[in-house]
Image (tube, rainbow, N blue to C red):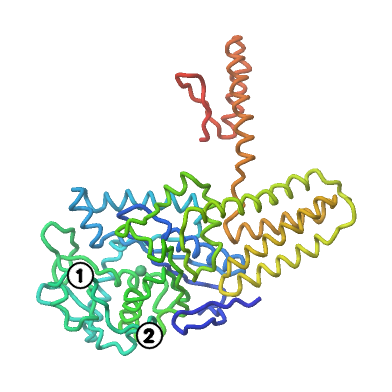
């Protein structure tokens, strides 16, 4: 099925045609590492991980770039409240983020680009914008984008004027010529980290880092930009204004994709609202795959209205599905090469692969795709009961691998891991027995054989432990 993508810019589903054949440049707004990764972040990054995986499964060569906002107001606030260095805070929370992403199998990002590594590009873009009359230097040596010079302002979101958030700093607002103008370069205040620029020491505004990073990696135009729907205005609107004013090339981005948020009783999940669920807390109670399944069991544009019982429900559903995947694997090892006549499993497999692809090619509809999986699982279980032979089961197992690779599911096999752990404990115990008998030849042979497959033994106070190297 030809892929269709909902483009926020045109407000409709469009055929997906990359700018350069099979090459796809994809950018997704990354985190500001200054606090724990919460479920809202996880929903966004799991969704775009599936997008990249699906595109790759269709033969596209995806270059997936994500920025890291490593200097920003919230990092400076944290710096002041904790008396820690800004880069120390960034290092800690970025490491936590990477750990969470890895556990959730979000493995498709090619490059994480840190804003402060692109100061040269940022300065160059701001200089260009000033030269072309799109930006101005304020009294305090901060630089602002003049939104009245960009006729396309508001075309992505339909919004024209920035809403003044309560608590927004008035002295900054006063330096703007127009309320919608936004900062490109913020002059240094005492005690704040700063970088050199033609306007004096300071730091980049939030919006400019993305266009500096993408223009350096992708050039003046690229295929796909993703992010949470709350970023469409003013963040993405500002990106368009900056890039299109700087390069003169329209559209800056071909497809704008926005993911729905995680809501709690109708409100956005946010630390300041006290309804914040860190992913690490969720992972203490649920397996990463259960969480991932929960997050993609909606089409990405849809929100999730979060309630803990929904996670329980997701756990039960996912375990049912995974049990079928496990029994297909077990049965096909056991099944005779020629079992009873195929009750239609080959057809069901073929139809499910086609239905899965149809769902995914319809704007990455993972909810529909997962519904296909459940239906397929029912067919597979029936076929197993009827004593189907190895051939059709091999096909079904292969189909589950295809589904699992695209969705990032069925990668973990906890039951098998548990079994292997049991076997290893037994081997380590047998070696201990050999040592007690002073049969050092056997003990050494076991240790060396384990070392050869990357398992090392360590003496602990209460005996010997094994560890993967
Ligand atoms: Zn961004």
Q: Nearer the viewer, residue 115 or 398?
A: 398
- Above or below, 81 against 450 in this view is below
Query: Residue 47, image x and y in percent?
Result: 50, 64
Compared across the picture, whether 403 is left or right of 75 comes to: right
Q: Residue furthest bottom?
A: 151
Q: Nearer the viewer, residue 458 or 180?
A: 180
Q: Quadrant of ligand 1?
A: bottom left
Return the mark for residue 168.
Answer: 1
Q: Residue furthest top?
A: 437
Q: Is 383 drawn above or below residue 201 in the view shown?
A: above
Please name the residue that numbered disc 2 is placed on.
155
Q: Residue at x 72, y 54 (%)?
A: 397
At x 24%, y 76%, the residue is 182
Relative image position of residue 459 (x, y in whole percent): 48, 21
Question: How crowded is the residue under tag 1: few (<14 C-alpha within 10 Å), some, or many (20+)?
Answer: few
Identify the residue at image location x=49%, y=49%. 103
The quarter holding residue 267 reads bottom left
How much space separates mark 1 and mark 2, taking CA atoms? 24 Å
Residue at image point 63% right, 66% down: 369
Q: Nearer the viewer, residue 403 or 437?
A: 403
Residue 50: x %, y % from top left: 54, 63
- Pick the residue in front: 368 or 88: 368
Sequence-first disc among 1 and 2:
2
């Amino acid at each position: 099925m030809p892929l269709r993508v909902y483009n926020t810019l045109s407000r409709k589903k469009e055929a997906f045609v990359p700018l350069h054949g099979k090459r796809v440049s994809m950018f997704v707004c990354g985190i500001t590492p200054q606090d724990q990764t919460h479920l809202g972040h996880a929903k966004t990054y799991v969704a775009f991980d599936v997008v990249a995986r699906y595109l790759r499964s269709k033969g596209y060569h995806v270059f997936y770039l994500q920025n890291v906002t490593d200097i920003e107001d919230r990092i400076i606030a944290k710096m002041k409240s904790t008396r820690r260095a800004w880069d120390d805070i960034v290092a800690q929370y970025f490491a936590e983020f990477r750990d969470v992403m890895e556990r959730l199998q979000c493995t498709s990002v090619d490059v994480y680009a840190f804003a402060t590594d692109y100061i040269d590009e940022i300065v160059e873009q701001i200089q260009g914008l000033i030269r072309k009359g799109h930006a101005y230097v304020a009294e305090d040596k901060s630089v602002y984008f003049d939104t009245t010079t960009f006729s396309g302002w508001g075309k992505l979101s339909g919004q024209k004027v920035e809403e003044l958030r309560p608590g927004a700093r008035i002295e900054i607002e006063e330096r703007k010529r127009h309320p919608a103008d936004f900062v490109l370069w913020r002059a240094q205040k005492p005690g704040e980290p700063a970088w050199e620029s033609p306007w004096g020491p300071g730091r980049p505004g939030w919006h400019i880092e993305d266009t500096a990073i993408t223009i350096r990696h992708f050039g003046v135009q690229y295929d796909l930009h993703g992010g949470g729907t709350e970023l469409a205005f003013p963040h993405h609107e500002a990106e368009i204004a900056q890039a299109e004013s700087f390069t003169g090339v329209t559209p800056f981005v071909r497809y704008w994709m926005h993911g729905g948020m995680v809501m709690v009783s109708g409100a956005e999940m946010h630390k300041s609202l006290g309804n914040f669920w860190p992913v690490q807390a969720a992972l203490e109670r649920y397996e990463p795959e259960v969480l991932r399944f929960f997050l993609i069991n909606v089409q990405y544009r849809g929100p999730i209205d979060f309630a803990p019982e929904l996670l329980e429900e997701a756990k039960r559903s996912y375990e049912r599905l995974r049990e079928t995947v496990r029994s297909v694997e077990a049965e096909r090892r056991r099944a005779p090469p020629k079992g009873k006549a195929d009750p239609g499993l080959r057809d069901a497999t073929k139809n499910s692969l086609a239905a899965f692809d149809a769902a995914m090619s319809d704007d990455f509809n993972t909810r529909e795709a997962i519904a296909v999986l459940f239906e397929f699982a029912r067919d597979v279980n029936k076929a197993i009961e009827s004593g189907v032979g190895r051939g059709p089961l091999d096909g079904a197992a292969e189909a589950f691998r295809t589904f699992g690779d695209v969705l990032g599911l069925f990668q973990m096999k906890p039951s098998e891991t548990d079994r292997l752990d049991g076997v290893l404990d037994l081997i380590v115990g047998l070696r201990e027995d050999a040592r007690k008998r002073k049969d050092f030849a056997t003990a050494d042979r076991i240790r060396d054989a384990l070392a050869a497959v990357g398992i090392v033994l360590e003496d602990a106070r209460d005996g010997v432990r094994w560890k993967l190297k």
